[in-house]
Amino acid sequence: MADSRDEAATSGGEPTRTFGWSYLFVHPDDDPRSDGNFADERAVLVEYLRDQRLTFELKCDGLNAEQLARRSVPPSTMSLLGLIRHLAEVERGWFRRTMAGQVAPQRYCSDDDPDGDFDGAVADPTVVDEAYRAWRAEVAFAEQFVSEAADLDVQGRQRDGNVIVLRRLLVHMIEEYARHNGHADLLRERIDGRVGQ
C-alpha cells in the first residue's frame, strides 16, 4: 500500500485519503499501547483501560483548539474537546465519588446544563488546556486508586445506593472509552483524514 496522501478534497471540502500507514495515528512499530500479553485478571483490566485511554489521547493529538472543538454534524454537539471534558466527568464520577466516596462536584455539567461538558467545548486554547488538565488529573486519580486497591472486589456506592465492585467498574470504563473512541475515530477522520487502527 502507498504511504502517500491524496491531498485532493471532495466537493464538500472534506479531506480525502487513500489507505496506508500515513493515515494511521502511529506506525505499528511506534505504537505505545500494550501487546496484550497480560499476566492475570487485574493486569488485563488495567492494561486494556490504559490502552483505551492512550487510544483516545492519540485521536486528539496534534489538533488546535478550533479542530478539537469542531462539532460532528447537526444537531449533535459532539466534538473531540467535548469528549475530553465528558471523559473527565466520567472518570471523576466513578472513581472519586462512587469508589473513593469523595465529595467531588461535577466540573462541567449541572442540573441547569446537563450537557455542559459538550455545550462548553468552545474553540478557546484556555478551555482546551483546562480540559486536558482536568482529564489527566482524573485519570491519574483513577490509576492511583486502582493500584492501591486491595483487590478487584473493592466496593463503591452509586448514587442510587447500589454497590458496584471495582472489577465491574473497570469493564464499564473499557466499554465507555471504546464507545467514545469510535466517535473520536469519525470526528478525527472528518478533520484531517486520519483513521484509527
Image: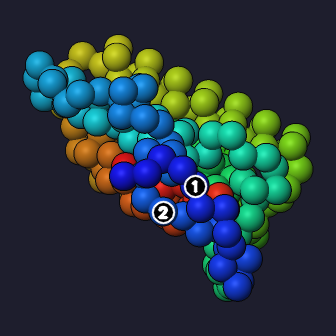
Vertical position of residue 92 compared to residue 110: above or below? above
Residue at x 87%, y 43% (from the top left corner): 125
Nearer to the camera, 33 or 103: 33
Q: Left or right: 10 with respect to 21?
A: right
Which residue lies under the disc numbered 1?
5
Residue at x 82%, y 56% (from the top left corner): 66
Nearer to the camera, 193 or 35: 193
- The x and y percentages for residue 118 are 69, 63
Vertical position of residue 1 compared to residue 141: above or below? below
The residue tagged with tag 1: helix, strand or loop? loop
Whether residue 31 appears in this view of the structure is yes
Residue at x 52%, y 31% (from the top left corner): 139
Residue at x 42%, y 26% (from the top left corner): 30
Find out whether the residues at labels 2 and 1 contact each other: C-beta distance under 8 Å: yes
The disc at residue 18 is 2
Q: How is the image coloured?
A: rainbow
Closer to the chain start, of discs 2 and 1, is 1
Q: Left or right: 168 with respect to 55?
A: left
Instruction: Please tell me how crowded label 2 is: few (under 14), some (14-19), or many (20+) other residues with Cα within 10 Å.
Output: some
At label 2, the amino acid type is Thr
- The x and y percentages for residue 50 are 38, 31
- Residue 35 occupies which quadrant of the picture? top left
At label 1, the amino acid type is Arg
- Residue 165 occupies which quadrant of the picture? top left
- The x and y percentages for residue 99 are 40, 35
Instruction: Please tell me how crowded label 1 is: few (under 14), some (14-19), or many (20+) other residues with Cα within 10 Å.
Output: some
Whether residue 90 appears in this view of the structure is no
Q: Left or right: 91 with respect to 89?
A: left
The disc at residue 114 is none
The residue tagged with tag 2: helix, strand or loop? loop
